[in-house]
Amino acid sequence: MTRIRKVAVCGAGGTMGAGIALVAARSGFETIRFDQYSEALARSRAAGEKFFDKSVERGRMSESQRDDTLARLHDSTDLADLADCDLVIEAIYENLEVKQALFRELNAICKPQTIFASNTSTLSITQIASGCGREDRVVGMHFCLPAELMKLIEMSRGLNTSDETFRDAWAWTEAAGQLPVETQDKPGFILNALLVPFNNDVIRAIEAGLATPEDIDTAIKSGLGYKMGPCTLLDLIGLDTQVLLGEAFYPITLDRRASVPPLLRRMVAAGRLGKKSGQGLLTGQNRPRAETAPDFTVASSGESRSFPPSDGFADRAADQGDVTVHLGGGYAPDPSKIAVLVELDTECLGVHTGEDMGREGSNVVGFARYRNGNDAPSNLIELVRQPATDPAALDAARAIFEVAGFDVVVCADQPGRIIDRLVRPKYNDALRFLDEGLATAEDMDKTCKLGLGYPDGPIERVTRGGLARHFDVTSALYAMTGLPGYAPERRAVVASARQAQAPVGPDLVKG
């Protein structure tokens, strides 16, 4: 139950504010849509009407429910109309001074019991509330885009937020049919604290020539099961928006990964903003899958992480072939072959072939089938090329795996390949946030699953894959790059130490 009956949304002419207003009205609350610009309100109202019309067409609501919902939406460009609201949610421009000024003005207008909520994604609730005159009645309420479809709300208290205010705001989110999670008043809360640096890492990987945006998206979707690749997401939210997020986030955290990558600034300067401008990271160019492949032989030097004994890939091998596939980390050069494939773990291909100041490359191609710890291997094969790798060798490697039914991507011989390079810092962040008490493990995972559509959360995934394995992978990445984001977090260090101390053998522990 909630005592809140009337809600206002400031910034309802924008995409996020408009969506929040739809959520409130759909749930039965009288809702004032406030914006400075009547034209913006008219556009967002038309979009809302179209959204509800489609809901009726799809059987999600009746015509009478649509009409009743639209009747509960009232447009205004005058803040005085918000005087008798029980809850005011601001979803305006991400600027601390502007938000503070709005709350000060509203404090003089609204009744003393009115709760002020901020939809900020990066700024401090305590700072936004400072000086408004009712710091105890201000709460963080971060919706996910698009608000009318996404159920998750990140709820946070400022230092002065009263328990009563937080309980009332929480009760309203549940009455509105949303799913709240509690997080501390820290930069980015959960969602953006994990997402903004991750997206920047993706852009830096592209700038470093690791892989194409298309292959990065394929790798993340196939290997991790994400519904949307990061480059698709960046093009959707807008590269200019990612710049604003970085500019808001980095000064607060001083985390290099949160700072705006140079490539991102260049693309925005060139007008390549993503979907809104028609050009972004993705080019739309995808190579067709191979339909035939050369014969290959298998040489085994040890246990293969990519193809366990129960896997049928090795059954495709011939007695003789133009390609040799080395499993288990072995390697022997053979210039007579079209391609020699070498299975990799955490090492670079150059460990096997040697390097020549950017001139290295031959018929040797590295590969690894992505696998989270001892989970079943994914359907993703990451091929590793060197600067002068023979294109025919790369084509042969791609064909062998694609004909076998795998998703194949190509990346440069850089630490971590695609997936480990991108996700391991995010897992480190999640482990650190858990230590710092930002949120519970369950709420962090719930946030990523509900807010981003992940099949599992970062804590669940890194734990299932093994914290000791995470230590091994991040240690290798840190040794090769020296970047702080790869330094193993405390829980992984502890897990590795415990594993090293564990007794070995079935008879050492007696029941």
Image (cartoon, rainbow, N blue to C red):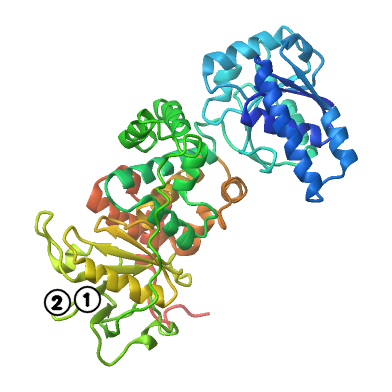
Tell me which numbered mark, 1 or 2, is placed earlier along the sequence: 2
Under circle 2, the secondary element is loop
- The residue identified by callout 2 is 333
Q: Is residue 187 left or right of residue 200?
A: right
Tell me whether the residue at label 1 lies in contact with that at label 2, contact meaning CB atoms closer than 8 angstroms: yes
Q: Position of residue 240 (x, y in %)?
A: 44, 31
Quarter-of-image position of residue 329: bottom left
How many numbered circles are shown? 2
Q: Residue at x 28, y 57 (%)?
A: 476
Q: Which mark is residue 309?
A: none
Q: Position of residue 73 (x, y in %)?
A: 80, 26
Foreground residue, 466 or 196?
Answer: 196
Residue type beneath disc 1:
Val
Under circle 1, the secondary element is strand
Would residue 305 be visible to someone looking at this image?
A: no
Q: Position of residue 70 (x, y in %)?
A: 82, 31
Vertical relation: 431 (above or below) 303: above
Quarter-of-image position of residue 508: bottom left
Foreground residue, 272 or 489?
Answer: 272
Q: Residue at x 30, y 69 (%)?
A: 367
Quarter-of-image position of residue 287: bottom left
Q: Which mark is residue 340?
A: 1
Residue type beneath disc 2:
Pro
Vertical relation: 444 (above or below) 375: above
Q: Residue at x 37, y 86 (%)?
A: 316
Alpha-carbon span between mark 1 and mark 2: 7 Å
Q: Is residue 9 left or right of residue 119?
A: right
Q: Is residue 136 left or right of residue 359?
A: right
Looking at this view, name the residue that lies furthest to the right: 64
